[in-house]
Image (cartoon, grey):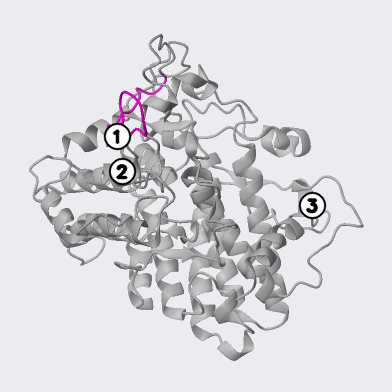
Amino acid sequence: MKKLILLLAFPAILMSCGKSYFDINKNPNTPTVTGVTPNLVLPAALERTASSNVTNGSTLGAWMGYWSIGTNFGAVGEHRYTMGTDFGNGFWTNNYDIIFDYHSLQQKAAASGQDFYVGIAKIMKSVHYQMLVDLFNNIPYSKAMDFNGNITPAYDKGAEVYKDLLKQITEGINLIKNAEVTANPEIASADIMFHGNKSRWAQFGNTLKLRLLIHQSEVSGFSAAAEIAAINAEGSGFLGAGQTANVNPGYTTDKPNPFWSTYGFTTTGSYPNTYRRANNFALGLMTTLNDERLRYFYRAVRSGTYAGQYRGIDYGTNNDPGQIYYETNTSDIGGAPNASPTAAQSIGLAKAPTMDCWVITASESLFLQAEAAARGWTTGNARSLYEEGVRESFRWLGVTDAVNAANGYLAGANVRVAWPAATADQIKVIIWQKYFAFNGNNHFETWNDYKRTGVVQPAISVDPGKLTDHVPYRYPYPNSEYSYNAKHVQAEGTIDPYSQKVFWDN
């Protein structure tokens, strides 16, 4: 395996290359990927995917009721759901930059007959294109990586992008399954997610396909039958318990996991993030349900009057003359340890500086499978898959005696936990438990479930200056598009993120 410092250096090299309309300036003295081989591009790209996955989405986490902001920071635009044309810049640019990395990998691997690498690139590009559609709806896709003088690519319909992503993932799985391993140099070490395991890549691809299908479940007239039949015929199934898709290029205490360095501890043991605090919506619900996981999603107040208590804030709170909701009087997010943990304390969200980065957790896969079974798409046992999804969440967090703790929790009678008889209610309880399991680790999919089903309605901001009475449905296009691809972005019309929705959100 390559040294971490080398892996983390490659994104800067890759990002410096010409990327259609994403890079405006060209510097002939800047390194390019011309001499970089697939085995060097892949680990850097996978690390970027995982790092982006675990550190982005803090605003969505607040909007969806998991996190808040200490009153010592005062009023912020986030509290008002402010979404200018600069709001989505980071998501747009970052996702397309990473897609370019995989596109470069795909081209280089195809030119040298390295089909395993080509298959991975096709699957991983789909991860990022899915996110872009879910954020922006119609996006540059079929021409986005066309570098033959096309610096202003046209937009493709979100529904057509989704349809082609299912095809690309299928092709990726087939390429990997049929690849001659020896023709793909260093695949076991360069693949820092599954280490060249063909079956695991097929399961990951199928899980990603199932996510795409589930997103479309409320679209009138939609049928998943053909794609489910294709997944069944492929035969590898989905990611199961204990099979979280993790990436780890060799994180160390001085080059730590990005989630750890953002929400856990600094290398000197101090807290890097005093901005994000516990939100009373999720904290209150989990307290009512006696959900042990709250102690692994949040930390008790560190000192002072409220030391040892779990305290949140109503989202959007600005008026706090008594300063009782300052950072020092509320719960940190990140998990159980109140000091930089030893290996034996590696629990919660922020487990250790050397912890893995996750791309798709096993609990998400199990919940997706549970919903597919409840809808009659598959022959799996919806209840068993649902309950295993909950257990996997407990295990992933490192809850003490996780299985027994989860089983005790599942025995509760609350409608957000207990398995019901009616299909509609089964889907609701699956969505609720996804909501609890995704606290701090998958705000993006929680937001997608909110848009798709409306089951979880997070408490709206209490800021009197808020611009809407619900969580926004999509992101506006970034201002860079209006500057450099004006013709095509303007053809999409005036974007109102408070009323307009992505194609699968009815």
Of 256 and 467, nearer the camera is 256
Instruction: Determine the CA span between mark 2 and mark 3.
Output: 42 Å
Specify the quadrant that holds the N terminus.
bottom right
* Label 2 vs 3, first from the N-terminus: 3
With respect to residue 57, does 349 lie above or below?
below
- Where disc 1 sits, the SS reads helix
The secondary structure making up most of the magenta span is loop
> Which residue occupies 8% across, 50% down?
411
| Relative side of 318 to 21, left or right | left
Task: Kindly tell me whether residue 9 is visible in this rendering.
Answer: yes
- Where disc 2 sits, the SS reads helix
Circle 3 residue: 150
Of 194 and 133, nearer the camera is 194
Q: Tell me where residue 428 sits by quadrant.
A: top left
* Label 1 vs 3, first from the N-terminus: 3
The residue under label 3 is which amino acid type? Answer: Asn
Spot occupied by residue 32 in the image (x, y as percentages of width and height): 82, 63
Which label lies toward us, 1 or 2? Answer: 1
CB contact under 8 Å: marks 1 and 2: yes
| Relative side of 189 to 217, left or right | right
Task: Kindly tell me whether residue 372 is visible in this rendering.
Answer: no
CB contact under 8 Å: marks 1 and 3: no
Spot occupied by residue 301 in the image (x, y as percentages of width and height): 34, 32
Per the rendering, the mark at residue 282 is: 1
Which region shows up in magenta?
301-316
Circle 2 residue: 435
Q: Residues within 10 Å of mark 3 (few under 14, many from 20)?
A: few
> Which residue occupies 28% across, 43% down?
295
The residue under label 1 is which amino acid type? Answer: Ala
The residue under label 2 is which amino acid type? Answer: Tyr
Spot occupied by residue 216 in the image (x, y as percentages of width and height): 38, 49
